[in-house]
Image (spheres, rainbow, N blue to C red):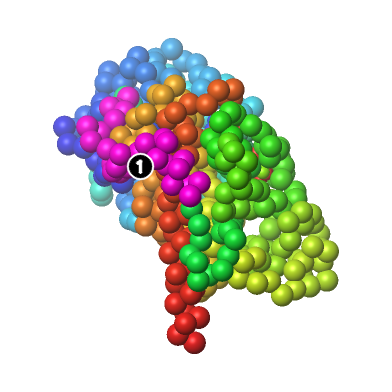
């Protein structure tokens, strides 16, 4: 049998399913009869599957269920089920629609007289068999989109192009793929804990820039792990796990006050960088691009209390009217939760994109800290040593780099200290590698700034 899923499609489905998945074709209307009997004979009792359809106007869409198909007429509970679109009018525009939590008991419906059906939201075919005619199967698909699956405001046009003339229907079994590449996807050289600690402790900003330290501005959605990153770095240098910055889960950002954190070595020396922890970005009442630019340009003083109801400006308390170069950000660190990349908010991405225009205009370097990698691959939760060989993480690095329009080398995967009470050498080294890279970029930016001033 030939395969109908492109590598883009496979990669996207795999990411949605937590990574490292393979898709084995079980049933295809290109080969098998289009009808309930052929479908059940090929697809029953085989565990998780994806059903994918292509319509006559080149929409590709379908549904995932972790529950086996069967023939006993019944609703099936599946809180992991989702519908999806892969292509829209021939172009790859993936979108995922999760099952509504309260409707998980009606995720799929199975019966020997029906093809695959997801809630009442979409049933791909009835009993059949159907003969293809005019390029599609007249298989009477049924639809009540949005009844059991959360369409997030999307309509039938967004999901299927409002066209259920299906020219192909295929079902794949979902299987775990290999977790690791044979060779690392990024060469991290001879990463030695002590060497990295010493290099960072010895770091000094470019002399001509006349700065005491560089400012590393942490920006990201609520709960992405900004405060935890400071706690992680602080822990590495203190020599034990600390939790100075408040971190945790909340609907709105836990960090409401802008803090520029110092990190000290074990001997108490203050290191030459500050981690600047901002309030999390939110869809509603969150920070706007111009607020972020105020942080970038050094207008915001340490301890500033962000108020979503008032506009940040010269009259706001804690607004520095005439910042010096030493007050500005010398590297912008976008913090992204690896486990929610597939549902990253469009609105927040819009804010980020607009902010990036200002960052680009000033030539300030940008990196992405990809946190919570332990949540995307269970192996990494136990042992982080395979991080730079891990296939899921490598895929996510590609996706996030594309989303933010940055080179893949600017995406730095890490796991923060959160549940741990003791330090772990692999977590330390990963965090140190990320900080080393951020400091290198900030350092280059100082040279750029000095050179620019020399030229004027
Ligand atoms: N598993 C895991 N959890 C993490 C990681 N990083 C952060 N967390 C958890 O994610 C939650 C949010 O982390 P925070 O550091 O408070 O996130 P934040 O970006 O500062 O959030 P706001 O200040 O609310 O905007 C906390 O419960 C952390 O323990 C990580 O790498 N892995
Ligand atoms: Mg925080």
Residue 8 image offset from top left, x and y in percent: 31, 46
Residue 253 visible somewhere in the drawing: yes
Residue 171 visible somewhere in the drawing: no
Residue 131 on the magenta segment: no
Q: Residues within 10 Å of mark 1 (few under 14, many from 20)?
A: some
Secondary structure at badge 1 equals: helix
Which residue is found at the position 71% from the left and 53% from the top?
258
Which quadrant contains ligand 2? top right
Residue 428 image offset from top left, x and y in percent: 47, 34
* Residue occupied by mark 1: 395
Query: Which quadrant of the figure has residue 26?
Result: top left
Camera-side residue of 197 and 389: 197
Residue 294 image offset from top left, x and y in percent: 67, 67
Which residue is found at the position 43% from the left and 12% from the top?
72
State the residue lying farthest toward the left.
1
Query: Which quadrant of the figure has residue 3?
Result: top left
Q: Where does the magenta region start and end?
A: 176-202
Camera-side residue of 359 and 264: 264
């Amino acid at each position: 049998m030939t395969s109908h899923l492109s590598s883009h499609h496979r990669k996207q489905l795999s990411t949605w399913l937590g990574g490292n998945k393979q898709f084995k074709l079980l049933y295809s209307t290109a080969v098998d009869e289009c009808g309930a009997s052929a479908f059940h004979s090929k697809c029953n009792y085989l565990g998780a599957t994806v059903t994918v359809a292509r319509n006559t106007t080149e929409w590709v869409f379908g549904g995932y269920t972790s529950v086996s198909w069967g023939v006993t007429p019944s609703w099936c509970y599946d809180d992991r089920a989702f519908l999806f679109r892969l292509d829209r009018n021939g172009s790859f525009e993936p979108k995922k629609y999760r099952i509504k939590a309260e409707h998980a008991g009606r995720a799929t419906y199975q019966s020997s007289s029906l093809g695959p059906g997801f809630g009442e939201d979409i049933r791909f075919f009835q009993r059949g068999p159907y003969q293809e005619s005019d390029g599609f199967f007249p298989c009477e698909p049924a639809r009540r989109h949005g009844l059991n699956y959360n369409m997030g405001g999307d309509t039938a046009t967004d999901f299927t192009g409002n066209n259920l003339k299906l020219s192909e229907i295929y079902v794949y079994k979902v299987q775990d793929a290999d977790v690791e590449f044979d060779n690392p996807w990024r060469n991290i050289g001879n990463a030695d804990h002590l060497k990295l600690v010493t290099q960072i402790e010895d770091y000094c900003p470019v002399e001509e820039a006349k700065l005491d330290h560089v400012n590393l501005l942490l920006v990201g959605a609520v709960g992405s792990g900004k405060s935890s990153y400071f706690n992680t770095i602080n822990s590495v240098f203190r020599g034990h796990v600390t939790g100075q910055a408040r971190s945790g889960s909340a609907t709105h950002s836990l960090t409401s006050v802008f803090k520029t954190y110092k990190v000290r070595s074990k001997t108490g020396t203050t290191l030459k960088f500050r981690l600047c922890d901002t309030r999390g970005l939110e869809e509603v009442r969150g920070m706007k691009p111009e607020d972020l630019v105020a942080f970038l340009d050094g207008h915001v003083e340490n301890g500033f209390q962000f108020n979503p109801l008032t506009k940040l400006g010269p009259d706001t308390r804690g607004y520095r009217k005439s910042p010096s170069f030493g007050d500005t950000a010398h590297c912008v660190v976008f913090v992204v939760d690896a486990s929610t990349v597939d549902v990253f908010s469009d609105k927040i991405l819009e804010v980020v994109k607009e902010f990036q225009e200002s960052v680009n205009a000033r030539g300030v370097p940008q990196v992405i800290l990809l946190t919570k990698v332990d949540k995307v691959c269970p192996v990494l939760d136990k042992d982080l040593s395979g991080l730079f060989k891990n296939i899921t993480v490598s895929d996510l690095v590609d996706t996030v780099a594309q989303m933010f329009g940055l080179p893949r080398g600017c995406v730095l995967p890490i796991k923060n200290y959160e549940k741990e009470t003791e330090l772990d050498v692999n977590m330390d080294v990963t965090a140190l590698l990320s900080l080393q890279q951020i400091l290198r970029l900030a350092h280059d930016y100082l040279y750029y700034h000095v050179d620019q001033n020399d030229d004027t």
